[in-house]
Amino acid sequence: GQQVMQIPQYQHVQEGEDFTTYCNSSTTLSNIQWYKQRPGGHPVFLIQLVKSGEVKKQKRLTFQFGEAKKNSSLHITATQTTDVGTYFCAGLWGQFYFGTGTSLTVIP
Amino acid sequence: DTEVTQTPKHLVMGMTNKKSLKCEQHMGHRAMYWYKQKAKKPPELMFVYSYEKLSINESVPSRFSPECPNSSLLNLHLHALQPEDSALYLCASSLDRGGEQYFGPGTRLTVT
């Protein structure tokens, strides 16, 4: 079946360091979305990427969609304690398949 | 109004009980979803309604029964659940299938 894997599973960084999570699909995706879930909270939509090779920025966050539309990445520059949470990608292949998630801890 | 509401917030039920979870949105979204999320795991899709018709049912056991009375409401009827069904049940909606999903706060379900 369709699988969307994310690495790493966990990441601990010092505040101010950069962070990257990678999302890989076993099949070509129509589009990909990214969500953030704070501890005890619900997923909150961050961005949607549709085009091959697309790059989008939101302040300190940079999102990329691979040329083959099978992988994506989220990069956070100069992490802050407010960035703590689990980041999920969700790939659209008929329906959305959520990735395994990367849990980010930011040490002040 | 960009909110998806869910009731109740918490639910404890025995294995012989019948209960319902409710979800509501007033954003004019035509797709609504039920997800199940276990601790430290991603949300797992259970059901998708598109234009009030069930379009995806991810091989969910029949003890879970979805209902979409109108375009703003989504229910999940629970009957004869098992302890392993304990989880956070999330409702989401999007303008159409494949669009940005807005999630509700979830119902934390415990089956005893």
Image: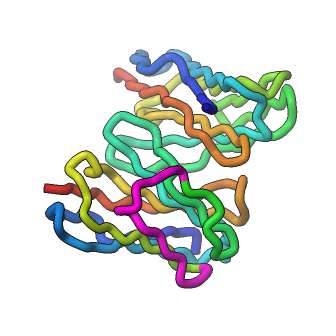
What residue sits 53% from the left and 59% below the top?
B47
Q: Position of residue A59 (x, y in %)?
A: 66, 36
Q: Position of residue A10 (x, y in %)?
A: 41, 20
What residue sits 67% from the left and 48% below the top?
A95
Q: Is residue B70 magenta?
A: yes
Left or right of residue A91: residue B8:
left
Quadrant where the N terminus of chain A is found in the figure: top right
Left or right of residue B62: residue A91:
right
Is residue A65 something that shows in the picture?
no
> In the picture shown, does residue A86 fall above or below B69?
above
> In the picture shown, does residue B52 fall above or below A1?
below
Boundaries of the magenta span: B58-71
Q: Position of residue A8 (x, y in %)?
A: 49, 17
Q: Which residue is at the front of the view, B35 or B63? A: B63
What residue sits 61% from the left and 80% below the top?
B71
Q: Which residue is at the front of the view, B74 or B56? A: B56
> In the picture shown, does residue B47 fall above or below A74?
below
What residue sits 63% from the left and 76% below the top?
B52
Left or right of residue B39: residue B66:
right
Q: Which residue is at the front of the view, B112 or A66? A: B112
